[in-house]
Image: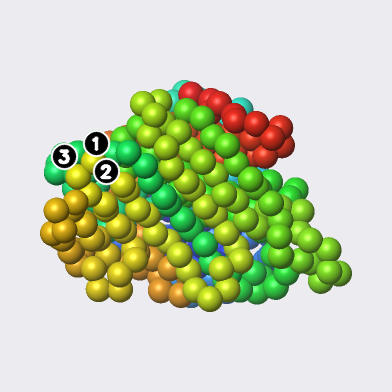
Amino acid sequence: MKKVRVGIFGAGSIAQKRHIRETAENPNVELVAVCDIVKERAEQVAKQYGMKAYEDYKELLAKENIDAVIVCTPNYLHAPMSIYSLKAGKHVLCEKPMAISSLEAEEMIRTAKENGKFLMIGHNQRLMKPHVKAKEILESGKLGKILTFRTTFGHGGPESWSVAQSLKTWFFKKEEAFVGAMGDLGVHKADLIRWLIGEEISEVAAFVSTLDKKYDNGQLINVDDNATCILKTKSGIIGSLIASWTYKGGEDNGTIIYCEKGVLKIGYDPEFQVIVNYKDDTRDCYNVGGISTNLKQLNSGVSDLFIDCILNGREPEISGDEGLKALNIILACLESQEKSTVAKVKQ
């Protein structure tokens, strides 16, 4: 079988700890080249994995014979890098959030279709085994109608995880990140919850704030570090989505779905990641594998799915269209905060 030749844009933490490592382990992949604006970082990663190093992604595309790229850069570069690569005839796997506006995201989707290439977004939560099992349980109908939900993603912040390992991380720069905890964590849960419950979010009401994170000079960072959002689906299901960079005593990456016949809990028991408590006081417990955390990185399945779709000519399940739907939920939450009102989600 012909190997998929891959180039990596960005050599930061998400590239090193997830995408490069996972693609390197895939027998159907040949890692060809990596680029990063920090030349030494690109060279270090290239040496480790037997790739060529570049500072300019356009130069990489011009000189290397590759089939696909994985975009692992700050958020403001996602759209321009993806669009340029799609026009160059490459399949693209782009980290989340896929863009900094719905217009950018729509252009990415349009460019992929015009050039006959795949665009996949790195929403890995729906691929985690506990979430796959939860989806199976919900679709079985044994819990009846979904009524409400709560989904949370919080940890101590990206400054200790990002390659910069400091308050100078791009995550804290609005001109590069465009949004804070909502773009880093909230967009993951926006994608997950609409996928889990099988409905689109139609309205939101949100408080999006900066409460604690500060620059070296003591000023609050200019992106959000906390968000609490109320979401409503088209059929009337309501629930909350919480994203936080200020959980200093450990992560919360859990979801609870409240249904007619019981409660489904995901990610709140160290042994049984999926638990169903029925209203008759019976219980089902499932040990189906873990949920990735910053401290414990499990194989996300994202890179493997991307490569499999390329090899089999199959449109990725986590397509650009799916990424746009999650992004639009986040954008509506930002609008709700800005205007102090309930905001409609662009469909």
Relative height, residue 13 to residue 315 (above, below): below
Which of pointers 2 and 1 lies earlier in the amino acid sequence? 1
Mark 3 burial class by Cα count in 10 Å: few <14, some 14-19, many 20+? few
Write down the residue under mark 3.
Answer: 141
Total number of numbered labels?
3
Q: What's the coloring here?
A: rainbow
- Between 213 and 17, the residue placed more toward the observer is 213
Write down the residue under mark 1.
Answer: 145
The amino acid on which the numbered mark 2 sits, given as a three-letter code, is Cys
Task: For the residues labelled 2 and 1, say whether their Cβ atoms are less than 8 Å apart.
Answer: yes
Residue that appears at 31% across and 47% down: 258
Residue that appears at 56% across and 68% down: 247
The local secondary structure at tag 1 comes to: loop
Q: Give the label, 3 or 2, closer to the camera.
A: 2
Residue 256 position within the rendered picture, expressed as x and y whole percent measured from the top left? 35, 53
Write down the residue under mark 2.
Answer: 259
